[in-house]
């Protein structure tokens, strides 16, 4: 079992569930943004101090970070989409809107 991947996914899941950008989450846990990105991309394993800090700040246990990703509900998906849209240009957002309209039409019939 790949514990590094499980805990890194748990950290990313926690950040998204709290509705935080990578920048804000990294600031809160006193980690560089690049360091957080590396964790979320499974390039590195978090230190015990980083795990302890995350658990203390957000009131979670290390075990909760190891749990597999549950299925997303609509609100979690909307949080993920909203976080991704924050960095998108107006042109990208317009294209995404057009794609959503096409998908909605296709599944409406």
Image (spheres, rainbow, N blue to C red):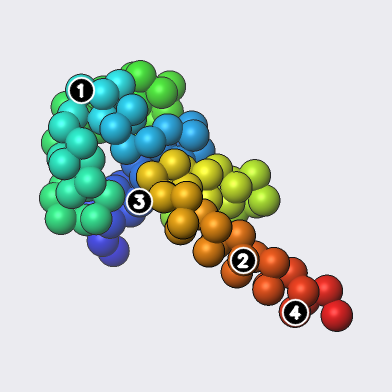
Q: Which residue is mark 3?
A: 9
Is disc 4 placed on a helix, strand or loop?
Answer: helix
Q: For the residue labelled by badge 1, is the local secondary structure a helix, a strand or a loop?
A: loop
Residue nearest the observer in this picture, 108 or 32: 108
- The answer for how far apart the CA atoms under marks 2 and 4 are is 13 Å
Name the residue that disc number 4 marks: 106
Kindly identify which residue carries mark 2: 98
* Comparing labels 1 and 4, the label whose residue is closer to the camera: 4
Label 3 or label 2, whichever lies nearer to me, is: 2
Q: Earlier in the sequence, mark 1 or mark 3?
A: 3
Which of discs 4 and 3 lies nearer the camera? The answer is 4
Mark 2 or 4: in front is 2
* Residue that mark 1 sits on: 30
Q: Is residue 15 visible?
A: yes
CA gap, disc 4 and disc 3: 33 Å
- Badge 3 marks a residue whose secondary structure is helix
Give the crowd class for mark 2: few <14, some 14-19, many >=20 residues within 10 Å. Answer: few
């Amino acid at each position: 079992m790949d514990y590094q991947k499980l805990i890194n996914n748990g950290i990313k899941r926690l950040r998204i569930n709290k509705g935080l950008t990578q920048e804000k989450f990294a600031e809160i846990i006193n980690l560089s943004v690049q360091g957080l990105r590396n964790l979320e991309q499974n390039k590195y394993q978090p230190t015990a101090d980083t795990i302890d800090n995350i658990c203390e700040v957000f009131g979670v246990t290390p075990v909760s970070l190891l749990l597999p990703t549950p299925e997303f509900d609509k609100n979690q998906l909307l949080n993920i989409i909203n976080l991704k849209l924050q960095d998108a240009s107006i042109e990208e957002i317009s294209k995404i809107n057009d794609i959503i309209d096409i998908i909605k039409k296709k599944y409406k019939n």
